[in-house]
Amino acid sequence: MNKIFITVIILYFFTSLVHANQYSKYYNLGIKYYNNNNLDIAKFNFEKDIVRNTKNLNSYLYLAKIFKKKNNRDEFEKNLKTVLLLDPKNEEALYFIIIKKYKDGDYNYAEEKFNIFKKSCVKLCKKKLELSELINKPKS
């Protein structure tokens, strides 16, 4: 009985590893195509990755970047909000959404996200001054 149980656990573990590698394949292809500025194929691969791994916030973040480059503001924001739903302190998503919301005139939302950003920044703390100047700029 113990041998069967151990065999099942081992098979499950290796099957999980194979599936995890297969899922990351689409993410890695998306990165490759994104870096080569082949945005349509990159988008397709990030979407395939999301179908298989719905909580990969990096795929959503890259989709946001793709939509930003394509000037699709609604999809850009939608993907940023998905990233923030999965990780409310994601610095890169906070940075982009603060700028977008400020430009849209949603100053309260931008300021709310800026307060989160300045308390939780680790990698992008250099951007704190830039965002602070934006948030404290007179509203038009």
Image: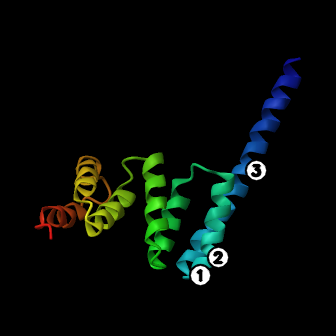
Task: Identify the mark nearer the N-term, 3 or 1.
Answer: 3
User: Which residue lies under the disc numbered 2?
Assistant: 41
- Image marks 1 and 2: residues in contact by CB distance under 8 Å: yes
Residue type at mark 2: give it.
Ile
Q: Residues within 10 Å of mark 2 (few under 14, many from 20)?
A: some
Classify residue 139 as left or right of residue 34: left
**For the C terminus, which image quadrant?**
bottom left
- Rendered location of residue 71, percent (x, y): 45, 78
The secondary element bearing badge 1 is classed as: loop
Q: Is residue 126 visible?
A: no
Question: Closer to the N terminus: mark 2 or mark 3?
Answer: 3
Q: Nearer the viewer, residue 44 or 78?
A: 78
Which mark is nearer the camera, 3 or 1? Answer: 1
The amino acid at mark 1 is Asn
| Residue behind mark 3 | 18
Residue at 39 percent across and 47 percent down: it is 88
- Distance (Cα) linking label 1 and label 2: 6 Å
Mark 1 crowdedness (10 Å alpha carbons): few <14, some 14-19, many ≥20 = some
Quadrant position of the N terminus in the picture: top right
- In percent of width and height, residue 61 lies at 48, 62
- Distance from disc 2 to disc 3, alpha carbons, whole Å, reads 24 Å
Alpha carbons under labels 3 and 1: distance apart: 27 Å
Q: SS for tag 3?
A: helix
Question: Which mark identifies residue 38?
Answer: 1
Instruction: Assign a secondary structure to mark 2.
Output: helix
Residue 129 point in image, percent of width and height: 17, 63
> In the image, is residue 122 above or below residue 130?
above
